Amino acid sequence: MTAENPEGLPSLADRIGRVAAPLRVQVLEVLREAILTMRFKPGQRLVERELIEMTGVSRTTIREVLRELAAEGLVRTIPQKGAVVLALSPDEAEELYDLREVLERHLVERFVERASDSQLVALRRAFTHLEDLVDEGAGTLDVLRAKDAMYDVLLTGAGNSALRTALSQLHARVSLLRAGSLSADPQRPRESVRELREVVKATEARDAAAAGAALIAHVRAAARLGIAAMRASEAAPAR
Amino acid sequence: MTAENPEGLPSLADRIGRVAAPLRVQVLEVLREAILTMRFKPGQRLVERELIEMTGVSRTTIREVLRELAAEGLVRTIPQKGAVVLALSPDEAEELYDLREVLERHLVERFVERASDSQLVALRRAFTHLEDLVDEGAGTLDVLRAKDAMYDVLLTGAGNSALRTALSQLHARVSLLRAGSLSADPQRPRESVRELREVVKATEARDAAAAGAALIAHVRAAARLGIAAMRASEAAPAR
DNA sequence: TCTTCTTAGATTGCCATACAATCTGTCGCC
DNA sequence: GGCGACAGATTGTATGGCAATCTAAGAAGA
């Protein structure tokens, strides 16, 4: 039933069709992850026929999924040309980080205000897990997943689902330029952990201002690296 | 070509089909506006067949549009039941206003930092236009359009397209509860103008903090009314 | 009469196909 | 070598169909 794969991308088809959820949602998740993990590279064209072969679903479904991805901002749809994976310019990247600062400061401040003690514990636990992974030298993907888990604790504790929606979409787009920021410098994960430790500490002390400042420092550091790497690869004729 | 209309909604079909743009985009705009102007009421079910009859396009197209609306957050899709116009609970409304404060303060601060003098003039002009409309006692829709124009000046001057995207989506959802806030109190538009005048003044003085504070005051006032009206109609058995 | 079961209709989820319009690259002609 | 016509690929849109699910109405039973 899963279509054979003419292009050497063997696994996408196998991951859909078994679970219980609208097919469209499963395909959406698969494609979204494929974009976020750079399996589909920024600027790459997403041809409907190829997606059909990869996933084994019909064109109708693929097109509906592409519309959702477009509305989420992960792909741009060019009329008569189809969907293209979002490719950020350095300026756009700066805009995203600028916005991220604002939203994440608010996130952590709200968390400090509203989170229960058990949520504080959950945050500490999530951070410790992340720390352990980095110490063990775990793979990038695992580290990112741990970071996501930490953010999830924050978002839950802040108790604002609109904020969750907005930040999720923002994070998705930001992570499109992770290629540069995280993998470039092997020391970066450790610094990252150090910065986040300050956030957790300030949070446990219920010091909203300090927690906000610490998180902003973290975002700024990530932004600096991400954007620098970006401008570098832009300047180079890496075409 | 435009299908006749069995339900007494005569104009939707006439507005699509002439211009030059993907049909899907035109339909999207028509449906979005129908939602934002309360022609489709919160909680109302959007049945595919009915939308087909209204717009004259095929089910394929309608479904793609519904996916986009869902991703934008204007409709919720319930599995096996279809699309329902977003109906906010009072708590969700508070969340939206909370987020709106954060984003709009940032918006106006950035505007003060970055806007050119001519953009300052444009802001003043947009405000004056709004003021005039309110003085003349213009219709709600015109007033809202003038307000949108003012926000557009701010967004352009702030020079962050990511912020524009985020705020647009937020405004769309917030405006779903305009029913209460704006039309309830006939004096509200005048107060609104007064609050915004402070924003414009502080902006012209290039005082970011004051402008941010003034805009927050405005958002808070709107929030208070909107949410109060909401809780009232919730408590009443207006079912 | 009230409850529960059954059944028919409506609706969504997904699919296959079709065809016009547009875009792209190529081949042959000038 | 440049230019134009043509073929192939791809998107945009429409149509018809079928299974799964939901809903409401009616029938059967307590």
Image (cartoon, coloured by chain):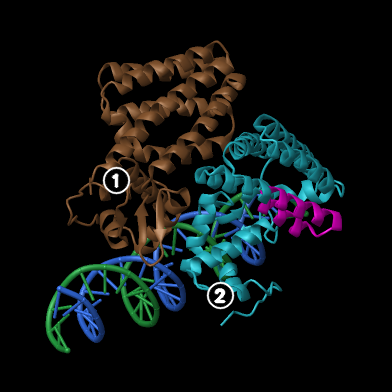
Chain colours: A brown, B cyan, C green, D blue
Q: Is residue A39 left or right of residue A172?
A: left
Instruction: Please indicate whether residue A196 sits to the left or right of residue A206 in the image.
Output: left
Image location (x, y in percent) of residue B58: 49, 72
Q: Which residue is labeled 2 in the image? A: B56
Neighbourhood count class around disc 2 (C-alpha, 10 Å): few under 14, some 14–19, many 20 upward: many
Residue plotted at (56% across, 75% down): B56
Residue A180 percent across, percent down from the top left:
30, 34
Residue type highlighted by circle 1: Arg
State whether residue D5 is above or below residue B46.
below
Q: Is residue B15 above or below residue C15?
A: below
Magenta highlight on residue B24:
no
Q: Chain of mark 2?
A: B
Residue B35, visible in the rendered structure? yes
Label 1 to label 2, Cα distance in Å? 37 Å
Mark on residue A15?
1
Of residue B133 and residue B42, the one placed in the foreground of this image is B133
Per the rendered image, the range of residues in magenta is: B123-150
Near mark 1 (Cα within 10 A), the count class, few <14, some 14-19 or many ≥20, is few
Residue D9 at x, y percent in the picture: 24, 68
Q: Can you see residue A116?
A: no
